[in-house]
Amino acid sequence: MLGNSPSHLNSLEGKGRGVFASHTIQRQTIVEISPVLLFSSEEYDLHGKYTILDQYTFKWTDGRLALALGLGSLFNHSETPNISYTLDPSTDSIRYVTVRDIEPDEELCIFYGHNLWFRPVESLTSIGPAAMPQEDEDEWGGLSALDEVTGPAERYTPFQDGDPDEIIPDDDLPLVRFKPPPEEETMESVMTMILVQAWVVDIFDPRQITGMLKWLKQVGLESQNLGHLKRIRKKNGGATLLLTTSLYPPTLPEDFDLPEPYKLLVPISAALTPKSLNLKSTFWPTVYAPPRKGEAEDWSRGKIHWAWEIVQQILEAADDAKSRGELPIVAHIPALHKKNNEDQAPVSFTACDTRRSTTHPLRHAVINVIRRVADQRAQANISPPQALLDGPPVALTDYEDTQNGVNYLLTSLTLFTTHEPCIMCSMALIHSRVKEVIYIYPMAKTGGCGSVACLPILKGVNHRFGIHRWKLPGDISTSRHGIDDSIDA
Ligand SMILES: C[S@@+](CC[C@H](N)C(=O)[O-])C[C@H]1O[C@@H](n2cnc3c(N)ncnc32)[C@H](O)[C@@H]1O
């Protein structure tokens, strides 16, 4: 270690030399500025790629090849880097900056890209060969053409071992929860709440109620997402039974001799305050669920593992989008399970931002992915079920137009996105009733999920969704998915 230098070299089994912190280093500290040696691709093809330098060279901003001097060539790779780096063509140098606080003797690592030419020591428990580099996509090293391509690397994924149901404490999570200020459900927000159309049926003989509740269970209607509403409303000695909020009424069991079901407007969410309970219950008996202090869903090991994999996938998809000339913004909705049909393979949706290729200013990744879900739903709903065909003729388009709530496309679903959604996209997510949003890069000037504004907590907005920022891979300004911070994602 030289003088007061923040870092020093050391060796690690399986990695060779690496750079280590000499003392505690704070987040956002420049730990190294390495001048680079630049040489042409012809020189590289003729000589460089046949030498050890091949493991240290990478593509410079203008297509030439670069070798970092100083410590720059000695940072090892990590999937969870604590150092980000910026290429500076004006000084032909690279700046290395810490992305979080660093402990003394901790190794300082950067992220080389997804196409490694070696197996990282962290992944040695997994089976299969390491991936080969692809010249155009790699940011670091391994630029020589290789003899055979052996498939993608088995990625090292934290949280994959151990009990998947174990709840992980917030401090150990790879993400940060957005904590909205405490809220009160005001009369105004209750008045602007959105109601949804539901099918109900009158039951005149109270002895039939138990039988009908059993029937709901048998046909799977009981498990529908209506936990915020009571099932039965008492009426003139009889009762009205809430059946479903689906587009079409269910076919009722014949042995009960019930009248035709009809539609009613019912609240879309539980009541947060006694006042809203009174109001909502005038539409339909509603459950009272005042928000518990600090209420937030726990993260299990299994859920983090699931999310981790998806985060890596969308980062790769953003690389792809970038290589096609699009903005490197990707949104993904995993595993859309069809209700009451568990045999159906889960469907997931991914879309990237296509503003550039379509020259259409609204083709944001989030809007594109919601559209995909809508298209899929539209296809699934193309023909009316038998119950409707048996009834009086109804024009399908009129029928759909009158259905409040059929457009709640993302109920119970999580949306992943590389960049914090802009205000337009955050509003679209509210309309779609998404359950939670996980984004990687905050957008300080345009983000609608906590940066510039937080749409789901605005007055008059009647749907809340959870917001999480993934802690990786660090600062957008130095990331490979960096975009102009005035662009709305
Ligand atoms: C740019 S050099 C880094 C410094 C290198 N460790 C050394 O001693 O010269 C890249 C090489 O380091 C090794 N390396 C870097 N990160 C690694 C990791 N996570 N696991 C195993 N080897 C790694 C690989 O051999 C790779 O070709």
Image (tube, grey):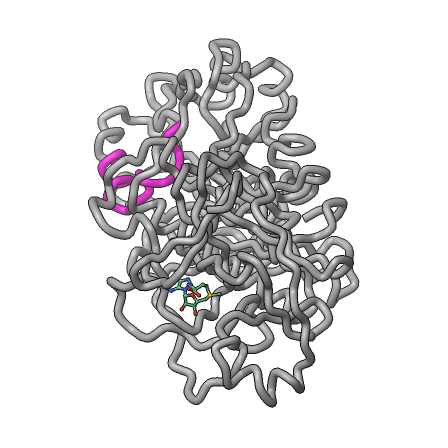
* Residue 277 percent coordinates (x, y): 47, 15
The reply to whether the magenta stretch includes residue 425 is no
Q: Quadrant of residue 386?
A: bottom left
Up the image or down, 337 lies above or below 269; here it is below
* Residue 172 percent coordinates (x, y): 36, 36
Outermost residue toward the front in this view: 3
Most foreground residue, 380 or 485: 485
Outermost residue toward the top in this view: 274
Q: Residue at x 54, y 63 (%)?
A: 317
Up the image or down, 134 lies above or below 306; here it is below
* Residue 6 percent coordinates (x, y): 51, 41
Segment colored magenta: 212-228
Most foreground residue, 292 or 185: 292
* Residue 366 percent coordinates (x, y): 61, 51
The reply to whether the magenta stretch includes residue 219 is yes
Judge from the rendering whether residue 276 lies leftward or rightward of residue 192; answer left or right: left
Q: Residue at x 55, y 31 (%)?
A: 463
Q: Residue at x 52, y 30 (%)?
A: 178
Up the image or down, 471 lies above or below 392; here it is above
- Which corner quadrant of the figure contains ligand 1? bottom left
Judge from the rendering whether residue 124 lies leftward or rightward of residue 84; answer left or right: left
- Tell me, yes or no, if residue 381 can be seen here: no
Judge from the rendering whether residue 60 lies leftward or rightward of residue 260; answer left or right: right
Most foreground residue, 294 or 27: 27
Most foreground residue, 421 or 112: 112
- Tell me, yes or no, if residue 32 can be seen here: yes
Up the image or down, 358 lies above or below 110; here it is below
